[in-house]
Image: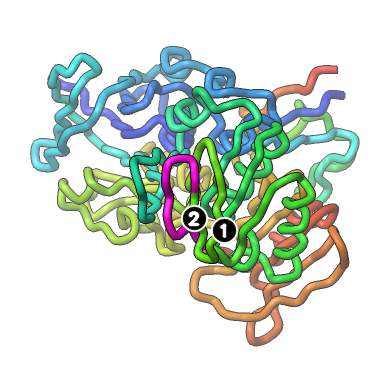
Amino acid sequence: MKKYVCVVCNFVYDPVVGMPEDGIPAGTAFEAIPETWSCPDCGVSKADFEPIEG
Amino acid sequence: MTNRGVVILGSGLGGYSLAREFRKLDGQTPVTVITADGGDVYSKPMLSNAFAQGKDARTLVNKGASQIGAELSMRVLARHRVEAIDRTAKTLRLMGPDGASLSLDYGRLVLAVGADPRPYEVEQDGDVKIYGVNDLDDYAAWRDGLPEHGRLLLIGAGLIGSEFANDLADAGYQVTLVDPAPWPLGRLLPESLGRDLAAALVGAGMTLYLGHSVRRLSVGKALLDDGTAVGFDRVLSAIGLVPRLSLARQAGLAVDKGVVVDRLMRTSDNDIFAIGDCAQTAAGPLPFVLPLMAEARSLAATLAGKESPLVLPALPVVVKTPALPIAVCPPPLGRSGRWSVDGDGRDRRALFLDEADHPIGFALSGSRIAERQSLAKMMPDLLS
């Protein structure tokens, strides 16, 4: 599972950690997050995230 | 017959985010974005940490105007200026890049024109160019010919000034930061965290003159109020923003610090809306990305036919100062209280408590910034 980074503010979503406080359990792949989810730091939509290669 | 669509003035995060959110709900209504800039899509917050990202003005661009236009089935008129709004005829008068005049009808008009850097007023000998950065064109001008490892004088140790200073110092520039406040992010941090941040910035190689201001600028040299002389190659001022209001004023819209909008982001004209740095909601001016996205979503729904009043949760802001990472969540406008700080050294949590000792804002440093999202959920909404 890849980490994803917000192209606006650089917030990194790490699937290993998830975001339990937002109802996203540890181990949730980015692709499995609801489309309505947005960046917790800057609020842009899920579409504004890119996979971190490597 | 003219198909009167949605016309958005401005191609910053506000204008383009609105267009994107609107297109999710409405694929039919014509959308036109008019911008005095080049219309490139870029991340505004990254202007103040571009060096750390290994980027310059050109590589900060995520996509060009024609690409975003095609993606969202809309027209982007780059390098066009709006000369006037005729609210009766619902027509704009524009000037194109070639200087030619043209007119464009609108059904609903959205002002997303942003803000200018606040001009820095100081006594000057000679003509010193004072740079200010609040968009990609500004950033390109600032970076162009910036002398390698040069001496840079930064005026203003607020959020943007501190971020720029840290980024430039890390990139090898000799940075001097001047601010009349006793510590950086003066209005956002309690003294203990403020002093920690100041020490961290000094540790990153900067020279700080806090509690001081520039008395006089001459070419290559600034004289501070205590008589200290600071040599520099370039000056950058980051002392705040002034919403761009001239178009709204000239059109006779209600204007205060920003263009006054209601909970539907509607100005005093029912068919004209405003969002972002140029707008003033009941929560006051909020020049941050998080409320901007909330505004874009709520206005997109309203424009698509479902009236959606703006709701703003508490607003945690991450300050990109790698020397000492900071996150802040300012209390709602006009609320008074006191700071309560725990933790030590570089890892602190400060809660801003109201009269009844309820937390209504916070500031975090170092590893404690990881608590920002859980803490933000405990804070009062800015607009509920």
Tell me where residue B267 appears, x and y as whole percent: 28, 52
Query: Residue placed at 83% from the left, 35% from the top?
Result: A14
The amino acid beneath tag 2 is Leu
Identify the disc placed on residue B223: 2
Q: Position of residue B95 (x, y in %)?
A: 18, 24
- Checking the image for residue B228, the label placed there is 1
x and y, in percent, of residue B2 in the image: 16, 21
Q: Residue at image x 72%, y 54%?
A: B326
Q: Is residue B25 visible?
A: no
Where residue B175 appears, as percent x and y from the top left, is 63, 43
Residue at left 45%, top 34%? Answer: B135
Q: Tell which residue pokes out farthest to the bottom in this image.
A: B355
Which contiguous range is marked in magenta?
B213-221
Residue B103 to residue B272: above or below = above
What amino acid is found at the position of numbered circle 1 in the picture?
Thr
Q: Residue at x 82, y 29 (%)?
A: A29
